[in-house]
Image (cartoon, rainbow, N blue to C red):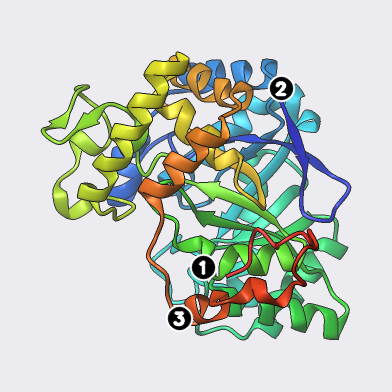
Amino acid sequence: MQYARLGTTGTFVSRICLGAMTFGGSAGPVSDAIGRLERSDVNAIVGAAIDAGVNFIDTADVYGGGASESMLGEVLGMHRNDIVLATKFSGRMGAGPNQVGQSRIHLIDALDASLKRLKTDRIDLYQLHNFDRFTSLEEVLGALDDAVHAGKVRYIGCSNHAAWQITKALGISGQLRIARYVSMQAYYSLAGRDVEREIVPAVMDQGMGLLCWSPLAGGLLSGKFDRHGATEQGSRRAMRGADAQFPPVDEDRAFEIIDVLRTISGRIGASPSQIALAWLLAQPGVTSVITGVKRHSQLVDNLGAVDISLSDQDLAALDEVSRTPPTYPGWIQSYRAKSRVPVGHAFPWPSWGP
């Protein structure tokens, strides 16, 4: 296993993070199709991941309506101190008007409930699951800072935020001298590279870790699909209707990517999933890739991605087929940008720039 620093902290996390969205029961259209792993399966998967060197596990209170956290709490046991345990909050956890969002009321209640379900006295990385437009960042960050000082939370992070929302929060934390985000969790895959336009530059500039969810685009890049549908019965995307595809993907473009993945995988003897994950692990700023699995064989396959070193030719081919079109102001900032460097001098060009 390979490890990377979590942002600018002194904590190291495995570059493959075990996602626990598949653990436990079901609640809602997403969790209903993804979850339902029984305790015996979860115990085997968590044990195998730890044996392979994985020390980073990510879940959320809404996964399975709390069942994911509960099951994870049951199986971690003596391994708790070996794991950097991350969870998230913000989604609705009850019918009441204050049982959702990031108000101080819900944050404190959600944190205590997660601690109870996870059978632990602290969360190593507590993350906002989304952006709450109804709660001021001063209230959110103040409550999170209190949780850090109370010893219930070690680090804080965010997920599914825009670049301006991240940098505004960091500015407030700096001004108030309170806990700041150490990481951002974002959707990032060969089939979804929007994050590269604003979020990756912001995260790298601010020294934050970048955690990538759905690196296989909901399983689409696993090699189990072709233009005619699923090649494996029971796969997640095969079981869900077209209106429920998550994350949303331009499938015509995705199948062009899959063609290149299959070509490379056939040449070097690795699965398309491993190639897609290896590409993501090679991208600037990426700290850890979150992989959710339903079977031990999937875990073994995903873990193998850390041992794959793609050639410059392979990286270029994948970049070419998956590259997103330029947007403003990125295209104008990159227009003749290299003329900024004197001719004949090999100054490094920022890989995350526009």
**Residue occupied by mark 1:** 197
**Residue occupied by mark 2:** 53
| Nearer to the camera, 239 or 285 | 285
| Marked residue nearer the N-terminal end (2 or 1) | 2
Q: Quadrant of residue 312?
A: top right
Q: State how far apart marks 2 and 1 are (Cα).
A: 32 Å
At horizontal 31% and vertical 35% (from top left) the residue drawn is 258
Tell me how many marks there are. 3
* Relative horizontal placement of residue 302, taking residue 241 as reference (left or right): right
Q: Is residue 111 above or below residue 245?
A: below
* Relative horizontal placement of residue 238, taking residue 87 as reference (left or right): left
- Check disc 1 and give the amino acid type: Arg
Place of residue 119 in the rendered image (x, y in percent of width and height, measured from the top left): 68, 38
Place of residue 169 in the rendered image (x, y in percent of width and height, measured from the top left): 69, 78
Q: Can you tell which of label 2 and label 1 is closer to the viewer?
A: 1
Q: Residues within 10 Å of mark 1 (few under 14, many from 20)?
A: some
At horizontal 47% and vertical 29% (from top left) the residue drawn is 275
| Element under disc 3 | loop
Q: Quadrant of the N terminus?
A: top right
**Residue occupied by mark 3:** 328
- Check disc 2 and give the amino acid type: Gly
| Element under disc 2 | loop
Place of residue 231 in the rendered image (x, y in percent of width and height, measured from the top left): 19, 23
